Image (cartoon, rainbow, N blue to C red):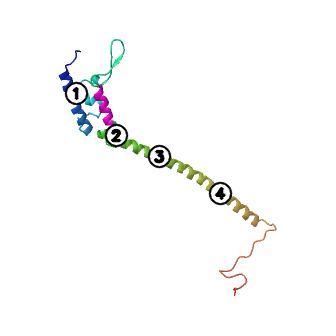
Amino acid sequence: MGRISDSDRARNEDSIRAAMDRLLRGELPPGGKCDLKTLARESGVTRTGFYPKRNRDGSRRPGPYQHLAEEFERRLTVLHAVGTMPDPRAAQVERLKSQVAELKKRLTEQQDQLVELVEFKQLALSQIAAQQLEIERLREALAAQSNIRALPRAQKASAPYGPCS
């Protein structure tokens, strides 16, 4: 692949900047995202120009449009930091992630509450069973002939020894 002229490079950079502005305003093509792949496609340059290259000796050199890719990433990060999402799908993904996190939190709280209620139910049932056993024991003791005597029952809502004055 041959080198491009300075005028072609300037024209490509102008095209990349125009596409960058459109993408960051949220004007995404159908099926596109707010990323370098879509930026390259919209500007008409190859995506490889946005990445560093290797010389024949193995050393690295910047790609011809790498500075524009870094500018794009930097501007996109700033937009995300202020709460603006140029890509509606990315905004939807972020919203759904926060909803999932909230639902997981609520589910954990409900599971903890359920465990507490099950423990309370077990405790209540064991106390009721113990009380029932004690009632049955006392009834058996009362029915058996022993030194326990039943107190006489009070007559219909009257005091046992007459009115208090």
| Mark 4 to mark 3 CA distance (whole Å) | 33 Å
State yes or no: residue 48 in magenta.
no
> To which residue does mark 4 refer?
127
Quarter placement of the C terminus = bottom right
Residue 75 placement, left or right of 139: left
The quarter of the picture where residue 49 lies is top left
> How far apart are the alpha carbons under marks 4 and 1?
80 Å
Residue that carries the numbered disc 3 in the rendered image: 105
Which is more N-terminal, label 3 or label 4? 3
Residue mark closest to the camera, 2 vs 3: 2
Pointer 1 residue: 13
Looking at the rendered structure, the kind of residue marked 1 is Glu
Residue positioned 34% across, 40% down in the render: 80
Between the C-alphas of marks 2 and 3, the distance is: 25 Å
Residue behind mark 2: 80
Report the number of discs: 4
Q: Closer to us: mark 4 or mark 1?
A: 1
Alpha-carbon distance for marks 1 and 3?
A: 47 Å
Residue furthest to the bottom in view is 165
Identify the element where label 1 is drawn: helix
73, 87: nearer the viewer: 73
Q: Earlier in the sequence, mark 2 or mark 3?
A: 2
In magenta stretch: residue 67: yes
Identify the secondary structure beneath mark 2. helix
Residues drawn in magenta:
66-76
SS at circle 4: helix
147 left or right, relative to 84: right
- For discs 4 and 3, the disc positioned in front in the rendered view: 3
Labelled disc at residue 4: none
Seen from the viewer's position, the closer of residues 117 and 13 is 13
Tag in front: 1 or 3: 1
